[in-house]
Image: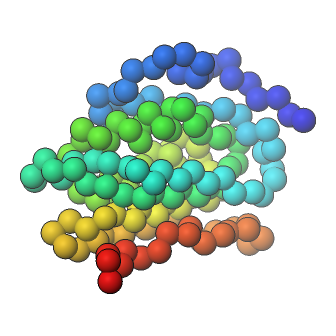
Amino acid sequence: MTATDVSGLTQLGGKTELPASPEAAVLEKVPAGHAGSLYLVRFTAPEFTSLCPMTGQPDFAHIVIDYAPRDWLVESKSLKLYLHSFRNHGAFHEDCTLDIGKRLTALLDPVWLRIGAYWYPRGGIPIDVFWQTGMPPEGLWLPDQGVPTYRGRG
């Protein structure tokens, strides 16, 4: 069993205030205990919220983040706080989705990362946004994200 070095973490193990904005949020990483192995890490945020930048009304999404680590793992509490920091942040669906994917990529330098954001309808139209760093590596087990297209009540 590989021990993970958590000595540099500032948020884990104590009370941490919700960041005022995504820019103010501190994303932290820990060394990947199995660097050199090809595997997938999945985070699912089924209750993601942000604000419409035009109306200030809340927007809701089911977000799935998949990545194949290289040398680093994102520390999950810091990711949770980062995602929650969007609650009072006004941005379009596409901007929220790509900002999350690109910030994680810059932090982790993963072998591969994808994000699927399945947004609930705004103005009667659901918007789904997908982004990835490139083609998934050969041999990576890549399960379906498991979120069906929005169907409403029909």
Q: Quadrant of the C terminus?
A: bottom left
- Could you tell me if residue 63 is visible in this image? yes
Total count of labels: 0
- Residue 134 position in % (x across, y down): 55, 67
Task: Looking at this view, name the residue that lies furthest to the right.
Answer: 1
Colouring rule applied to residues: rainbow
Report the front residue among 39 and 105. 39
- Could you tell me if residue 133 is visible in this image? no
Q: Is residue 116 left or right of residue 41?
A: left
- Residue 7 position in % (x across, y down): 68, 17
Q: Is residue 123 left or right of residue 145?
A: left
At 81% from the left and 44% from the top, the residue drawn is 34
Task: Looking at this view, name the residue that lies furthest to the left.
Answer: 55
Query: Does 32 appear above or below 26?
Result: below
Report the front residue among 86 and 29. 86
At 22% from the left and 50% from the top, the residue drawn is 58
At 13% from the left and 47% from the top, the residue drawn is 56
- Residue 47 position in % (x across, y down): 40, 50
Q: Is residue 30 left or right of residue 24?
A: right
Q: Is residue 116 left or right of residue 7?
A: left
Query: Does 138 appear above or below 4?
Result: below
- Residue 52 position in % (x across, y down): 18, 53
Query: Does 38 appear above or below 81?
Result: below
Query: Does 71 appear above or below 120?
Result: above
At 67% from the left and 69% from the top, the residue drawn is 142
Q: Quadrant of the N terminus?
A: top right
Task: Looking at this view, name the residue that lies furthest to the bottom.
Answer: 154
